[in-house]
Image (cartoon, rainbow, N blue to C red):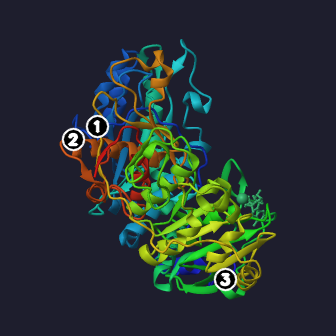
Amino acid sequence: MSGRGRGRGAYFRAKYGGGGRGRGGGPAGDAYGQGPPMIDDSIPQAGGTRDWKQLTNDLKSIDGQQYGAYKRLYGKYEHTGPSFTLSVDHVQGDAFASPSRVRAIMPWQQTGLPKEFLQSDIRRIALCDYVTRVCASVIRSKHMDQGPNAGGGGGWSGPKGGAFNINAPGQEVLPRTSAMISSSGETIELRFTTSLPAAGRTVLGQQAWQILAVNVVELVLQSLLYGNLDQIKLGQHVISVENQSALRAQLAPANLIAFVANGAILPRASGASAAPMDPKKAIRFQSPKELEVSFPLPDGSSVSGMGVARGITLLTGGGFHGKSTLLEAMQLGIYNHIPGDGRELIVTDPTAVKIRAEDGRAVSSVDISPFIRNLPGGRDTKKFSTDDASGSTSMATNIQEALEVGCKSLLIDEDSSATNLLVRDVRMQTLIRNEPIQPLVAKARSLFTQHGVSTVIVIGGLGDWLSVADQVIAMEGYIPRAITADAKAIVQQYPSMVTEDKTYGSVPVRNIQVNLAGTRSPFAMRKGFISMKPQARNPVDDPSEAEAGIDLNGIDQLVEVGQSRTIAVLLEQVAGKTAANASPLANLLETMSNRLGVENCLPTNLAHGDLVGARPLEFAAALSRMRGVSVNM
Ligand code: ADP
Ligand code: MG
């Protein structure tokens, strides 16, 4: 990237020493679909501790026995040279049940990793994220996953199981339970899932031995021993993440809500891929001179780029000139990215929320009166509830719910908005007198002055927004230009008739109660949906019940299914906490603060290896979309 100071490799060598070998993996792309359900929240302590030879003996002794004999593996096996513990935490009941879970736990001392990596949560997160990527890459390159999804496995009568995985990350560096450091810093562990292999209903001991006694050892050697890791690459990963985090922390003091570095690559390889566009094809970001700012980074370098100030910012320009791409990069600037992603030095206010229209979503008792009043039939918009919101009511709800949980920056794209919530021109104002909607264009100013909430909005065709903007940025062939002065001149020439509302109105405060009685444990098989099947009936008989759950597809800032899994696990905890009494949403988020967040380590007593950190904002967004979540104010 241009705009940088000295190279990161040099810093790394000075800081951590060592040369590094050419081993180690790149980012893993293949997401691993994990089976349901995930209920428990702590690791069962079953079985005893045995020495490593016993693992081979145990597998020999159960070979050819009924599948249930695998249960004998529960407990721990001690490997020596290097020493680590294989902990068998969950053994599936049959070959088709959700996979078994094992951990490899190594004393930090053994790893040879520099203890500087333990210094902060952000370093621990970056290190664990890196070793997860190395594992996923070795599993792929050595074809260790022999499950049906990987092309192994067999039909009804053939071999079953054989899947072996670690939860593979995408482009973001996030807290993950796939690799974790104990809070004391004494151990680091890897968490795998495996479908223990079977022929028909009998144990395939030899294949299980390959997984547990060979593959796991190989992965421990390759990804936990500093001497075997690509030390340069690891150092760059950690430093890059630390830089990003520190850069984000400098936004607020500089009165900015976003920063986009010169040289950044914003577009993605395709609509279906989060990988960067080929750098030979992409036009790198270059800030307009008027908006350029520079920041120092912790590694001693500095970075220059475009600062987006608090207030109301319009991103405009012709169609297909890169407006939405810029906004999308900004909405993911709440996360740190892997080196090479192209968006490493694009950072955004950590409370920023992408707002879109989401018709069809469920709404429970949200005050949307700042935007909508006097609905037909005298419907209350101070406690608006519906099973099927419209474009405008869903968008008003999304804004109000974001404010409820502390959002200070709204990110909006005309492409995915309800036009009637954004603006109403003078002709419509004259024609339709009993319009219940007060559009955002009339509210954005008071939202900022009264609640300190900024708006960044992509506008192609709605010129009324020019009159309320503090700054206007035009995208022209993917290069931004500052055109605030031109825009002001046009407003003089063609005055618009936006009647600004001097008072924004209230922000909702809700008490929430989640009742999961009669429902099976919520779980997420995919990013966009948390399934909550009823307990009693067989969902296979009734497709509508099979789809009972929470639709997360409107939450654009969720990036991994692992985040949805975390939300599902926490939902169950909220149900527990609110069983007797409804509780204010803010308090609920507070009590779960050590299980939420994207820059703090997750607690090691979360049992599963496929959970990924999510912001309280996304958790609240999911909670709010739950049908029948009961609310009283
Ligand atoms: P708009 O919202 O202005 O209509 P988009 O952001 O959707 O435009 O971008 C249009 C197309 O241009 C997309 O296919 C996108 O991948 C591509 N694109 C965006 N930014 C760049 C860039 N910096 N370099 C090359 N292609 C880009
Ligand atoms: Mg667009």
Q: Earlier in the sequence, mark 1 or mark 3?
A: 3
Q: Does residue 158 appear to the left or right of 596 in the view shown?
A: right
Q: Amino acid at mark 2?
A: Ala
Quickly name the residue at label 1.
Answer: 515
Residue placed most toward the observer, 174 or 567: 567
In three-dimensional space, the C-alpha distance between marks 1 and 2, rounded to whole angstroms, equals: 7 Å
Helix, strand or loop at label 3? It is: loop
User: The N terminus is located in which quarter?
Assistant: bottom right
User: Which one is in front in this view, the residue at disc 2 or the one at disc 3?
Assistant: 2
Asked if the residue under mark 2 is in contact with the one under mark 1, i.e. CB atoms within 8 Å, the reply is: yes
Q: Position of residue 168 (x, y in %)?
A: 53, 47
Q: Amino acid at mark 3?
A: Gly
Q: Position of residue 509 (x, y in %)?
A: 32, 58
Few, some or many residues within 10 Å of mark 2 (<14, 14–19, 20+): some
Question: Can you tell me which quadrant of the image ligand 2 is in?
Answer: bottom right
Q: Is residue 599 above or below residue 502?
A: above
In three-dimensional space, the C-alpha distance between marks 2 and 3, rounded to whole angstroms, equals: 54 Å
Quickly name the residue at label 3.
Answer: 3
